[in-house]
Amino acid sequence: MLFGTTDLAARIERAECRMLADSAAAVRERRDDGSLFLNALGGGIAIYAGDGSPLNKLAGLGFGDEPLEDSALEPIERAFHELGIPVQAEVSNLADPAVAALLNRRGYVLEGFENVLGLTVPVEALPPIAAEIQVSPSGTDEIDRWVDTVVTGFLTPDTQGVPSHESFEREVLEAVIRDMASSDAVTRYRAARHDEWAGGASMRVLEGVALLTGAATLPHHRRRGVQSALLTARLRAAGELECDIAVVTTQPGSKSQENVQRQGFELLYTRAVLVKPPP
């Protein structure tokens, strides 16, 4: 059994923060109007990557050597609120408990949760990919098609489980997913079913952690094994890259969570999504 320890959670959160930081850097390189920022904070990071961006958040808090203090939060909150947007903090239940207590005192309210699941790699027995589905790495020559496929899948989510508290404009989501997937550290995958594009996904490796990200299936190809095929292909690749753990983040009770648990993933910890609106 894979057990969610605080050390494992800290390692996963570091990998997530690094991925977010690289994505924010890609946004800055593409479009920096002077308002974008990326700051270390409480063992994690604070990011503002543009109006409406899903990257706008505080992540990885509570895993640093020093406690999070009011004096560190105040300028970050002020920067977000001067832009007229709320501050969103995603806090692991394995982080320093003082973080959630501090955020509560400062007026943050609970908006939702997300689950972090993991699987030990290499996986001894992976299910076969259905004959009608082909999964392969997706090159830079087809990134427009890949982004369109993934975004379309994201914008038509399954209704199973707890709904997300967030929604994003297509144009914003396309830009962010492109930035996140364009890094040399990311491998993109496409799935075809009966030779027709059916879905896409990505994977990033850091510190032996394979972050399985960006997975989406076009609505008319769902319930046909596309997600399972993309998962199997990435787990095989993670093993070849000598990762020791693969990680997925899902909405609680979602079809995505059901799919990965069917392949052996176990719940490691939950992140609370805490939000402080502008005054």
Image (cartoon, grey):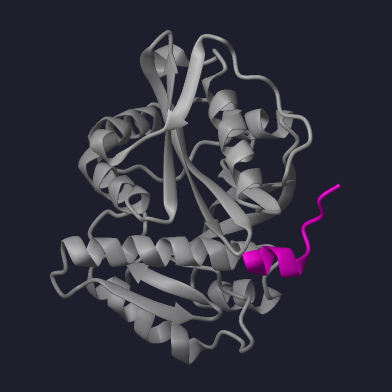
Image quadrant holding the C terminus, namely bottom left
> In percent of the image, x 57 and y 42: which residue is there?
250
Above or below, 49 relative to 167: below
Is residue 93 or residue 279 the one in the foreground?
93
Q: Is residue 171 left or right of residue 209?
A: left
Q: Position of residue 11 (x, y in %)?
A: 64, 67
Q: From where the camera sits, is residue 174 visible?
A: yes
Q: Is residue 151 left or right of residue 216?
A: left
> In percent of the image, x 59 and y 51: which residue is there?
210
Start-end of magenta stretch: 1-11
> In percent of the image, x 46 and y 87: which residue is there?
72
Q: From where the camera sits, is residue 49 visible?
A: no
Give the quadrant of residue 152. top left
Above or below, 168 relative to 150: below
Above or below, 158 relative to 90: above
Q: Is residue 102 left or right of residue 33?
A: right
Q: Position of residue 184 (x, y in %)?
A: 37, 55
Q: Is residue 155 magenta?
A: no
